[in-house]
Amino acid sequence: MYTIGYDIGSSSVKAALVEASTGKVLARVQAPQEEMSMQAPQSGWAEQDPELWYRYVVETTKQLLARTQVPSSEVKAVGIGYQMHGLVLVDAEQQVVRPSIIWCDGRAVATGEKAFAGIGEERCLSHCLNSPGNFTAAKLKWVADHEPENYARTAHAMLPGDYIALRLTGEATTTVTGLSEGVLWDFKENAQADLVIHEMGLDGNKLCTRVPAIGKQGTVSEKAARETGLTAGTIVGYRAGDQPNNAMSLNVIRPGEVAATAGTSGVVYGVTDRLSYDPDQRVNSFAHVNHAAGEDRIGILLCINGTGIAHRWIRQQVCSPGTTYENMERTAGEVPIGSDGLHFLPFGNGPERMLQNREVGARMLGLDFNRHTRAHLVRAGIEGVAFSFVYGMRIMQELGVELSTIRVGNDNMFQSRLFASTISTLTGASIEVHNTNGAVGAALAAGVAAGLSADLNEAVGRQEVLSTIKPEPEDRAALDLAYQTWAAALHAALS
């Protein structure tokens, strides 16, 4: 028996077909090969046509079935991971009312801030764990204020993953995890967030019927079966936003476990069993995929803009042409921990949320022309990015994330042993490198709904661990000193 998982991004749709009993990945595909189009009708706006996402769901499904020659009748369930915080509006005939306002669209910031003040900051945070900010609720209010005719036509306001589920099943549904990421869930009341809805003057009836994040959410309709090649009646069994889904895909489902990635930007996502929120909003808190009333599982989400982009800048601007990241790793190893007093603040990719939206800029500190070489610059760059992760993780620890295991995919900066070892040693956590991605995780989780796995622990526990990086006690004193010097420089830059 098999399952399929989808990862609906803003640049592409990834899909994977998995053997449920073993977790073996038979095939992974992506469409389109070039990035999906995105529209920006005004500066700071970002929109996409939801039909594009479904078109590539259809295309990737057909590719998987053709490549593996697995009969569609043997695919028992599908799961959906998707870009967070977007807004999709459909009318009573399930037709899209307007293009989706996606995650990186900034038009609703002032709308969310006004509602946050109106609700009361402490009240809003204690109930919803977040400010409405620029999340889905604020985007819906923006439409109500600026496009009243589109708002009036709307029968269902939903997230991107809800729309894909709608196209597959014909039913308009959502999940607690989805409502939470839109700041439309009240954790104290265990219900939709009426305090947000009422403050914004929204119609709560436009929100979709709730289904479990992991469980039978619906089945593939006859129409969708004809379009995709799936068999009618196939279970749609899982749905979550990309960051909680990526964490789940890395088997991060228990308190104390943490997922991380360090691509162009970096993300750390840790699970706690406390209804934690950050009064300073340096990190965000959402319901994790296995959150339930009476068994809280909250994902604390940290985003760092200046990570892989900083590492790439040093490779392109400091290193010789043709230098690879493997070359940089060897070069960095030529100098000691702390780069002989050279320190790098990697915050040159816009305002940093964990620094309370301050724009510090990237800075190289302590540069000595008579002492420092290219190797020092490379090592200081790697250490600076690693230190920024540690800085953010310590904020997360204040909110109840007990670092024990950090799980990462086998890609981006975590392929650097120096980078990963620095984080492991300073936090005391082991770093596990897993062979998985978001589409694979969504497929495995969907199998739980179809009875192909006993529970989520069993489903994602089958993944291959490629390596484990453990703290190196002999380096701890030197790293502590280097980190404290770096942190002092950051605090001076912020003052």
Image (cartoon, rainbow, N blue to C red):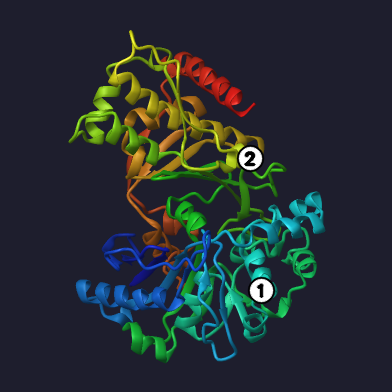
Establish if 115 lies above or below 32.
Answer: above
Depth check, front residue: 298 or 351: 351
Residue 380 on image: x %, y %: 39, 23
The numbered mark at residue 146 is: 1
Q: Which residue is mark 2?
A: 356
Residue 170 on image: x %, y %: 50, 86
- The residue furthest top is 370
Please state if 347 lies on the left or on the right of 211 as rendered.
left
Please state if 202 lies on the left or on the right of 217 as rendered.
right
Label 2 environment density (alpha carbons within 10 Å; few <14, some 14–19, many ≥20): few
> Tag 1, which secondary structure?
helix
Depth check, front residue: 34 or 465: 34
Establish if 15 lies above or below 188.
Answer: below
Depth check, front residue: 335 or 249: 335
Which of pointers 1 and 2 indicates the residue nearer the eye?
Answer: 1
- The residue furthest left is 322
Instruction: Name the image quarter holding residue 128.
Output: bottom right
Label 1 environment density (alpha carbons within 10 Å; few <14, some 14–19, many ≥20): few
In this rendering, the count of numbered labels is 2
Instruction: Name the image quarter holding residue 120.
Output: bottom right
Q: Residue at x 41, y 69 (%)?
A: 452
Three-letter amino acid code of the residue under disc 1: His
The numbered mark at residue 133 is: none
Q: Quadrant of the N terminus?
A: bottom left
- The residue furthest front is 42
Give the mark nearest the N terminus, 1 or 2.
1
Q: Residue at x 39, y 75 (%)?
A: 52
Residue 159 on image: x %, y %: 55, 70
Q: Residue at x 61, y 76 (%)?
A: 157
Instruction: Name the image quarter holding residue 185.
Output: bottom right
Three-letter amino acid code of the residue under disc 2: Gln
